[in-house]
Image (spheres, rainbow, N blue to C red):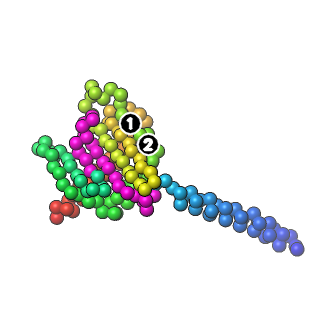
Amino acid sequence: MNDRQKKIFLAICITVPFLLYSVYYYGMIIKNAPYRFAEFDSMVFKYGYNDSLVNQYDSKTGDYQYVNSKDSLVKMHLKLTKDDLLYLHRKAADLGFWDFPVDETKDDTAKIRSPRYYIEFNYKRKSKKVTFDEAYNGDPKLIDANEQLIKEIKSKLSDAEGRQKQ
């Protein structure tokens, strides 16, 4: 063997096992990811002031109720499309929802009337629940991520309601 063949042999002996191991390792991580859309079951979204979460949506049953501008409770059956749910799942993943703390409420909320949100994503093997209060004074990036996710969920619900009325 000359020097060139030795270098090629050495490069193959090092890179091929490394590439095979990398494909195997990352393939297992992706396969065992805890929150995959293929295992998505349902989403629950509730909001209101303090502990009275009157406005509610459950994607499994399609039950949607909210208080309109005339202070009357509106109940309807509203189904989000698979694309809507996929968008919300991806948005939650982009914003890091899976790493949010479960309880993001302020201790003395009884004195302050502030909006409270409950978001729950259910999967076949796991679920993630987060309670967020707008009076929460934690990490500003976390608060911003919560507000963006809430805005996206409300937007998809209003879009679905608009499609249903047409």
Q: Quadrant of the N terminus?
A: bottom right
In the image, 35 versus 41, the foreground residue is 41
Give the residue type at disc 1.
Answer: Glu
Give the image quarter of residue 3: bottom right
Mark 2, secondary structure of its residue? loop
Residue 51 colored in magenta in the image: yes
Stretch in magenta: 36-57
Residue placed at 31% from the left, 56% from the top? 60
Residue placed at 58% from the left, 59% from the top? 28
Give the image quarter of residue 133: top left
Q: Which mark is residue 104?
A: 1
How many other residues sit within 10 Å of disc 1, few (<14), some (14-19) or many (≥20)?
many
Left or right: 12 in relation to 95: right
| Pointers 2 and 1 in contact (C-beta within 8 Å) | yes
**Residue 5 screen position, x and y as percent:** 83, 73
Mark 1, secondary structure of its residue? strand
Give the residue type at disc 2.
Answer: Phe
In the image, 142 versus 57, the foreground residue is 57
Q: Quadrant of the C terminus?
A: bottom left
Q: Which residue is mark 2?
A: 100
Q: Is residue 120 visible?
A: yes
In the image, 74 versus 133, the foreground residue is 74
Give the image quarter of residue 25: bottom right
Give the main secondary structure, helix, strand or loop, of the magenta stretch.
strand
**Residue 26 screen position, x and y as percent:** 59, 59
**Residue 51 screen position, x and y as percent:** 27, 35
